[in-house]
């Protein structure tokens, strides 16, 4: 993310507090001072006050209750922000642009998993993390 908008820390704080009140025990969420962008089996994407996106992931969700934190790559962060923007449209401002206009080579810009000529709606393309293009990892 190039520059963090002034409104972001307060917004993330408000959404984190709202989620804490709704979900109850969110010590793990408070630990990283962030709001949930989305969650799936064994993984949640968290947007922190500083604008960084973190994964809270199961080490081996079938056999263990252990979770670890890791910083998302720029590509993963863009995908998580895109998913989060479905509930919080303000977050669209945080998604990097595609200045080259080039579509993801795997999904041809759909952002969805494509295999054997078929598309799987709602499942992220593993190459572009559901964004439809490749993000410059240095921005």
Image (cartoon, rainbow, N blue to C red):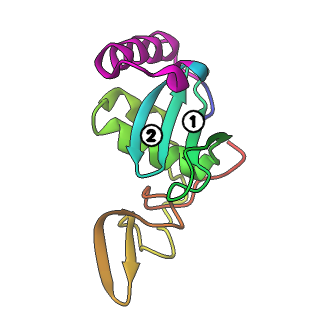
Mark number for residue 53? 1
Q: Are marks 2 and 1 in contact (CB under 8 Å)?
A: yes
**Residue placed under numbered mark 2 in the picture:** 81
**Residue at image point 37% right, 90% down:** 116
Q: Earlier in the sequence, mark 2 or mark 1?
A: 1
Mark number for residue 122? none
Instruction: Depth check: give the residue in front, 123 or 91.
Output: 123
Q: Position of residue 98 (x, y in %)?
A: 51, 53
Depicted 52 relative to depicted 71: above or below: above
Q: Which residues are magenta?
A: 4-30
Q: Position of residue 52 (x, y in %)?
A: 61, 31
Instruction: Depth check: give the residue in front, 38 or 107.
Output: 38
Instruction: Depth check: give the residue in front, 15 or 135.
Output: 15
Q: Position of residue 34 (x, y in %)?
A: 51, 23
Q: SS of the residue at dot 2?
A: helix
**Residue at image point 46% right, 18% down:** 12
Q: Quadrant of the N terminus?
A: top right
Depicted 35 relative to depicted 38: above or below: above
Q: Is residue 136 magenta?
A: no
The part of the image, by quadrant, that contains residue 2 is top right
Q: Marks 2 and 1, how far apart in space?
A: 8 Å
Decide: few, some or many residues near mark 2? Use Cα within 10 Å; few <14, some 14-19, many ≥20.
many
Q: Position of residue 124 (x, y in %)?
A: 41, 62
Q: Quadrant of the C terminus?
A: top right
Decide: few, some or many residues near mark 1? Use Cα within 10 Å; few <14, some 14-19, many ≥20.
many
Q: Is residue 12 magenta?
A: yes
């Amino acid at each position: 993310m190039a520059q963090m908008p002034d409104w972001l820390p307060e917004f993330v704080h408000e959404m984190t507090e709202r989620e804490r009140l709704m979900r109850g025990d969110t010590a793990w969420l408070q630990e990283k001072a962030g709001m949930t962008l989305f969650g799936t089996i064994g993984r949640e994407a968290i947007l922190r006050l500083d604008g960084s996106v973190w994964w809270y992931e199961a080490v081996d969700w079938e056999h263990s209750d252990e979770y670890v934190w890791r910083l998302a790559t720029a590509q993963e962060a863009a995908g998580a922000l895109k998913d989060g923007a479905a509930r919080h449209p303000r977050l669209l401002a945080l998604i990097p642009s595609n200045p080259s206009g080039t579509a993801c080579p795997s999904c041809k810009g759909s952002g969805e998993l494509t295999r054997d000529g078929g598309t799987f709606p709602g499942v992220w393309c593993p190459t572009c993390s559901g964004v439809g293009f490749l993000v410059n990892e240095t921005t």
